[in-house]
Structure formats: structure tokens, C-alpha cells
Image (tube, grey):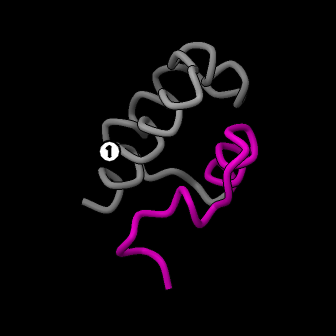
Amino acid sequence: MEAEKWGRRIRAFRKLKGYTQESFAKELGVSVSILGEVERGNRMPTTELIEQIAHLLNISKEDLTPPNEKE
């Protein structure tokens, strides 16, 4: 469930910024299959990946964090 919420937010922000899954994965240095697993909620993103995603999308980690995960 947690991974699903992260994945939905990552996908939404990626699309808002105009990235395709392929171009975004390439920029992150991960395979499209790994990014797809994260976006579908089958894989929990690592802290490092979350930081990379936030940096690449020019948003804060807090913006990316699902509401129930924020402290």
C-alpha cells in the first residue's frame, strides 16, 4: 500500500513535468522496468531514488512524499 502511494505520486509528477517513462528512467540512470515497478507500487523506492527523483523534477522531497507519510 505504501509503495502504491509513492508510485502514484511519482508518476503524476513525472507526467506533469512532461517526461516519458523512458526518458525519466534514462535521466535517473535506472531501467524502465524498475521505474515501472516503482510507479505501479510493486517496488518501494529507495531514499536515494526519491532524492534523485525530487532533484530531477525540481521539487522537494516533501512535495513528493504521500500525505500520510509526512511528519
In the image, 58: left or right of 46? right
How packed is label 1: few (under 14 Cα within 10 Å), some, or many (20 or more)? some
Q: Position of residue 26 (x, y in %)?
A: 68, 18
Task: Name the dominant secondary structure of the magenta segment.
Answer: helix
Q: Is residue 57 left or right of residue 4?
A: right
Q: Which residues fall within the magenta stretch?
A: 48-71
Q: For residue 67, which quarter of the picture?
A: bottom left
Label 1 element class: loop
Count of marks, rendered view: 1
Q: Which residue is situated farthest in the bottom direction here?
A: 71
Estimate the x, y position of residue 54 in percent, counting from the top left. Answer: 67, 49
Q: Residue at x 43, y 35 (%)?
A: 11
Q: Quadrant of residue 62?
A: bottom right
Residue at 39 percent across and 45 percent down: it is 7
| Residue depicted at x 35% and y 44% | 8
Q: Residue furthest left?
A: 1
Q: Is residue 21 above or below residue 54?
A: above
- Looking at the image, which is closer to me, 63 or 31? 63
Q: Which residue is mark 1?
A: 41
Which residue shows up at 61% across the image and 52% down it? 50
In the image, residue 37 sits, relative to residue 1, either above or below, namely above
Type of residue at label 1?
Gly
**Does 24 appear above or below 52?**
above
Q: Is residue 12 magenta?
A: no
- Quarter of the picture holding the N terminus: bottom left
Image location (x, y in percent) of residue 53: 65, 43
Instruction: Classify residue 9 as left or right of residue 57.
Output: left
Indicate whether residue 63 is drawn in magenta. yes
Q: Left or right of 62: which side holds 7? A: left
